[in-house]
Image (cartoon, helix red, strand yellow):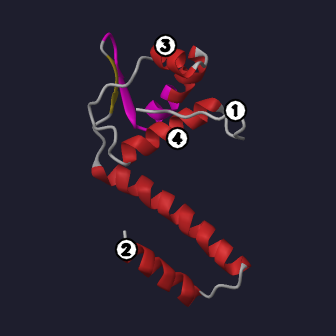
Amino acid sequence: MEIILSNESDRPINEQITSQFKEMIMKGELKPGEPLPSIRGLARDLHVSVITTQRAYDNLQKDGFIITVPSKGTFVSAQNKDFIREENLRRIESLLLDAAVLGKENGVSLDKLIKTLEIVYAHN
């Protein structure tokens, strides 16, 4: 598991950690029940404060991505597939919105955008 942080990003460090964990969980790189590093261990590995990693874990737990079992540790939650699907659909909509805006700004027709999506979809 690799978390990459950027001091040059506009996003706070705890949000960078949160989003990377969410992405790994949604892509299936982290499986339900899989243990996560301790808050202190992650803070040490990333060279950030314990408060920063605590905030990231709090956000992940609030959003249902992880669970903390007292005296045992923190684990990827056994989420239902509907939740993961909804989260992925939200990400897809966001990416498609970006593509639509970029297409409009550059005079690309809706038909051309749809054909481009069909080609990309077919080859992946």
Mark sitting earlier along the chain (3/1)? 1
The residue type indicated by label 2 comes to His
Residue 58, x across and y down, in percent:
50, 27
Distance between the Cα atoms at labels 3 and 1?
20 Å
- Name the residue that disc number 1 marks: 7
Of the residues shown, which amino acid type is indicated by label 3?
Arg
Q: Secondary structure at mark 3?
A: helix
Residue range corresponding to the magenta coloring: 57-71
Residue 64 highlighted magenta (yes or no)? yes
Q: CA distance from mark 4 to mark 1?
A: 15 Å
Above-or-below relation of 86 to 70: below
What amino acid type is highlighted by mark number 1? Asn
Lower position in the chain sequence, tag 4 or tag 1:
1
Q: Which badge, 4 or 2, is on the more N-terminal residue?
A: 4
- The mark lying in front, picked from 3 and 1, is 1
What residue would you read off at disc 4?
19
Residue positioned 55% across, 63% down in the render: 95
Q: CA distance from mark 4 to mark 2?
A: 27 Å
> Mark 4 is on which residue type?
Ser
